[in-house]
Image (tube, coloured by chain):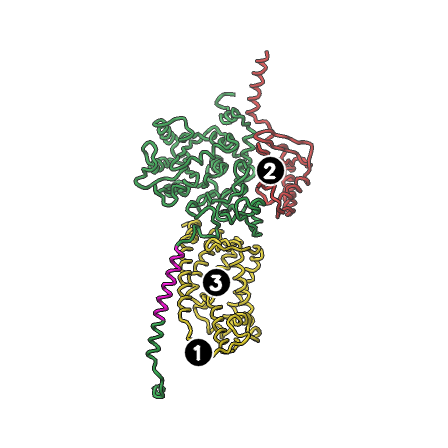
Amino acid sequence: MALADIPIQAMDGGLTGNGRALLIEVADRLARFAAGGEAHVIDLSGLPLSEADRDWLRRELGEGEVHVRLAAAGESILHETAYSGVWWVEHRNEQGRRMSEFIEITRVPELLLAHPDDVILGSERLNHRIFELD
Amino acid sequence: MPESERNPLIERMAGEGISRRAFMKYCATLASLMALPAGAGRAMAEALTRAARPSVIWLSFQECTGCTEAITRSHSPTLESLILETISLDYHHTLQAASGEAAEHAREEAMKQHFGKYLVVVDGSVPMKDGGVYSTIAGISNHDMLMDTVKGAAAVIAVGTCATYGGLPKARPNPTGAVAISDLVRDKPIVNIPGCPPIPVVMTGVIAHYLTFGRLPELDRLLRPRAFYGETIHDRCYRRPFYDQGKFAKTFDDAGARRGWCLFELGCKGPVTYNACASVKWNDATSWPVESGHGCIGCSEPDFWDAGGFYRALSLPADPLKGMAAAAAAGVVVGAVVSVANRARKAEVRAGHETATLADLDK
Amino acid sequence: MNELEFLTWVRGPGMNIAVSIFVLGVLWRLFEIYSLGRKADLAPGRERAGASGWHTIGRRMLPPPGMVKRSPVSYIGGYVFHIGLFLIVFFFAPHIKLVEDIVGLSWPALPSPVIDAVTMITLAAMVAVLIDRINHPVKRFLSGFEDWFTWTVTFLPVLTGYLAVKHLGLPYTTLLSLHILSVEILLIVLPFTKLFHAFTTFGSRWYTGKIHGHRGVPV
């Protein structure tokens, strides 16, 4: 019987208050980043967050202008929140199950950047393709 | 870009349809599972794609090959076996192309070339009885091969319950005299990854940790990585509310079982088993034994094969009690004998009874 | 020996030894006591209504008049922990499972949270009774090694059982082993100490009532 089918009242269906605590941490890290400090990643999997806390935090941070669907070994969804510099990153596997989730405080998540080696390879391939077309 | 600067691992993965981003995503999840700091995923991805591929020698002794199957046949086979791509697997019975003398030669060459730096992974227990004849490779007993191979090892990773605790071969009456790897290897860093088999991502996580940070993760008293073996199944079981309320399934597929009630009465050993099945789960987090309706059998604990029936609850004797009839009979016999002695004593006292007289009081 | 090996031992050989000695001891002592018999009472019977063995068992369930006021802790505490022990041992699901395994009988269990509350009350009552025994000069004077020892071997199973279910203190495997071990110790000493009153009380009261009933006196 799958977890979703069991008709129990989940004990942690409510808010624990940890969502708000995390929001304060995000604000603190964002302030530091804004002042020229380092980017930061918060791993949501290891924290005592109930599902309700997670949903609350996600709603609270909201959505911004950028919404990225990354197709790599299953779907990953990266979206900028309503606060510039705060990104919500959710990794799913090929079955659509959530594998890990992060909040990144950065200009853009590193995963989105094209790797220099890949750029060089891409350049070679493109030149090769043009050669083929001629 | 010159050939030597291309990253062979990335190219190999691209050839199998795994993009760099997929690999980075995998490393981020792996680091998260091991409760490493959030930036460790990136460090892991970079470390694992380094040009230098550390040599790994995989020794298979008295085992069923289940551990190798688990690590290579997880649902996304390419991601799990990616770890096998980041290392130079110089010796592995099931996976290597070479055989016979050539294979043994490859092992010896790897040991010589990378002395002091190679990793030794072991699955299966080592038989010690009768000079270790019960499991030999190329005429060499497991014991001799193990002690010889670990001489230049940087670390030893014992994979599976057989290698970590002796496992199935060690079960009563242990006809081959099987022992665990940690019983034999005393002077090298060693980590135990028990389970029958272990959860694939646990195996890869430990290897990835070693390759990234150059040392083994934090271990508990039984040398298991705390990140995965720090809690019992019971601690993280989603059926815990039912245990706390006393709602137990009585038989398989009864009304309680269908409602997902606790499997304590069906023999679940979750409370005494340390593993990550309840949180990490199996087959890419698809499910795990309790979620599928079967109690935990405690497969990552020492001597779980001898810990009594799998379907006997923890509150029951490990196996049905023996000798109760004999004890009852003995009790009745002893009681009868003592009664006879008591009656004899009573008769004796009565016979020897003397009436007290005034004269006695003066004494 | 690691934790699981210890648990397997107490669930295996340990259990066999303890239950065997218990069965042997109980049958021995019962046989020994009842085979003593009674002298035939040759006086003519003067049976009266309300004077019999069963009546005595019933009457002795209640404290004698005035005694609760004189020794409240003994009586109230005593009742509470006896009833508590009975409920915990016979109405907690894992225990019923154990009885079912050994003799084949089973019955519905009480909800685990109820047993939880009963356990806390039982522990408190046992501690109260102990403190009373220590503080009251006459009780302390009358108490010997056997009294302290039997209190301890009865208290430990309840305490370790509670800690195990709550996962408090030590790792669960060790707590469960200690609980089963403490029960095994209790089983071994029960037939040979005053704890044997568990088997003799009702028989003794019945005989007392019967004998006096024959004389026409309700006791």
* 10 Å crowding of disc 1: few (<14), some (14-19), many (20+): few
Residue ID for mark 1: C42
Asked if the residue under mark 1 is in contact with the one under mark 3, i.e. CB atoms within 8 Å, the reply is no
Segment colored magenta: B323-342
Residue ID at (47%, 75%): C211
Provide residue B132's location: percent of width, then percent of height.
32, 39
Quote the CA–CA distance across marks 2 and 1.
Answer: 90 Å
Front of the two marks 3 and 1: 1
Overall secondary structure of the magenta section: helix
Under circle 2, the secondary element is strand
Chain B tint as drawn:
green
Q: In this view, does A108 lie above or below B266?
A: above
Answer with left or right where residue C69 lies relative to residue B360: right
For the residue marked with disc 3, what is the amino acid? Thr
Q: Can residue B355 be seen in this view?
A: yes
> Which numbered marker is on residue A101?
2
Chain C tint as drawn:
yellow
Quote the CA–CA distance across marks 3 and 1.
Answer: 43 Å
Asked if the residue under mark 3 is in contact with the one under mark 2, i.e. CB atoms within 8 Å, the reply is no
Residue ID at (47%, 65%): C198
Q: Can residue B122 be seen in this view?
A: no
Provide residue B88's location: percent of width, then percent of height.
44, 29
